[in-house]
Image (cartoon, helix red, strand yellow):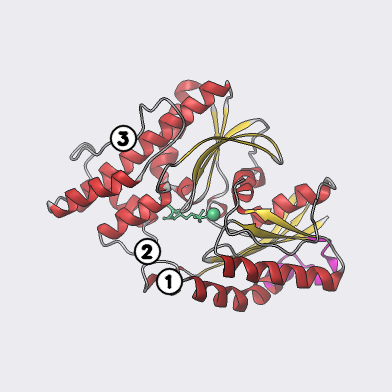
Amino acid sequence: MLVLGIETSCDETGVALYDGGEGRLLAHAVHSQVAMHEAYGGVVPELASRDHIQRLVPLTRRVLEQAARGVADLEGIGYTEGPGLAGALLVGASFAHALGEALAIPVLGIHHLEGHLLSPLLSARRPGFPFIALLVSGGHTQLMRVDGVGQYRLLGETQDDAAGEAFDKTAKLLGLGYPGGPALSALAERGTPGRYQLPRPMLGSGDLDFSFSGLKTAALMLVKQQGNAADIARAFVDAVVEVLLAKCVRALQTDGLTRLVVAGGVGANQQLRAALDAEARKRGFDVFYPEPELCTDNGAMIAFAAAQRLGSGAAPGAHAFTVRPRWPL
Ligand code: KG4
Ligand code: ZN
């Protein structure tokens, strides 16, 4: 089954073609709106929606061309139904449903986080079920147990800021622009470890929950004391990585599993990956990541999730036109 995937939940327009029969991603394209929102220091929802409208048709043409397929070859469409910005989601939903109606093919709304969770299954080295998934994005920080497509159990989550949000807010304090995660990570590479000590929030809480809002406040104190920016960045990254690592290990041990999947934008972070890889070697578990370009928002993960569901015939509400800006997985 040839499935078109559409992602418009926030500030990336993602379109992809996944062949369920071959089990292969044929093409994918992403347009990032980061440059447009940068001037405002964050995403402006109305501008995001308008830009998605302009990008969807050309991006869809591009992936069809790359895969040497025509629009009439499409057999199903998946779009991000939520969570995300209401207006932005509506653009993707309208496009998907209009095209699906015109072609008389099934259209399925997909949970954005399910897309992220399953994205490592698009890699050559893919995890088997069950696995523990660490979802770390700009909007979410969660640990889930995944027993199969559609079988997800929430084990713990952030009580306040998401990890990516903490990266972005701390980067802003250091004058690194928006979104500052990658820049903060690069700056930390030049910092001296241990020069400043930041708290490890909820490290000893005995559960799998997180809290990151205090970290940015602690970093603000150091900025006010005119501390060295690279050393502050290093202290921040080390604190976040230590907490994420400890909770992942705890989740694996509690559930007696040996496979860990890391997904979402912060999963691209090199310091986090190095720490997880080292711990995996030490403790004998396996860590799986999506391909680097599929860590952040993209259409491939939506096409893939839709192909799994449409292919198995399990597509309840396949023709309902809905978006869900707030939607627990
Ligand atoms: O998954 P994603 O693209 O969008 C959401 O659904 O939120 O994640 C974006 C988040 C941003 O907060 C961004 O700063 C962060 O991921 N991010 C990183 C890195 N690359 C992206 N944070 C730390 N290090 C990185 N290398
Ligand atoms: Zn995302």
Residue 214 placement (x, y as % from top left): 30, 44
Ligand 1's image quarter is bottom left
Q: In terms of image quadrants, where is residue 84?
A: bottom right
Judging depth in this view, the residue of 235 and 65 nearest the camera is: 235
Q: Are marks 2 and 1 in contact (CB under 8 Å)?
A: yes
Give the residue pinned by disc 1: 37
For residue 72, above or below residue 3: below
For residue 96, above or below residue 111: below
Residue type, label 1: His
Give the residue pinned by disc 2: 178
Query: What residue is rendered at 46% in x and 53% in y?
Result: 138
Q: Earlier in the sequence, mark 3 or mark 1?
A: 1
Give the residue pinned by disc 3: 200
Q: Earlier in the sequence, mark 2 or mark 1?
A: 1
Disc 2 CB within 8 Å of nearest ligand 1 atom? no
How many marks the image carries: the answer is 3
Judging depth in this view, the residue of 108 and 294 nearest the camera is: 108
Q: Are marks 2 and 3 in contact (CB under 8 Å)?
A: no
Q: CA distance from mark 2 to mark 1?
A: 8 Å
Q: Secondary structure at mark 2?
A: loop
Residue type, label 2: Tyr
Residue 248 as seen in the image, left or right of residue 54: left
Residue type, label 3: Arg
Residue 239 placement (x, y as % from top left): 31, 38
Q: Is residue 64 magenta?
A: yes
Q: Secondary structure at mark 1?
A: helix
Residue numbers of the magenta segment: 62-76
Disc 3 CB within 8 Å of nearest ligand 1 atom? no
Q: Earlier in the sequence, mark 2 or mark 3?
A: 2
Residue 67 placement (x, y as % from top left): 74, 64
Q: CA distance from mark 2 to mark 3?
A: 25 Å
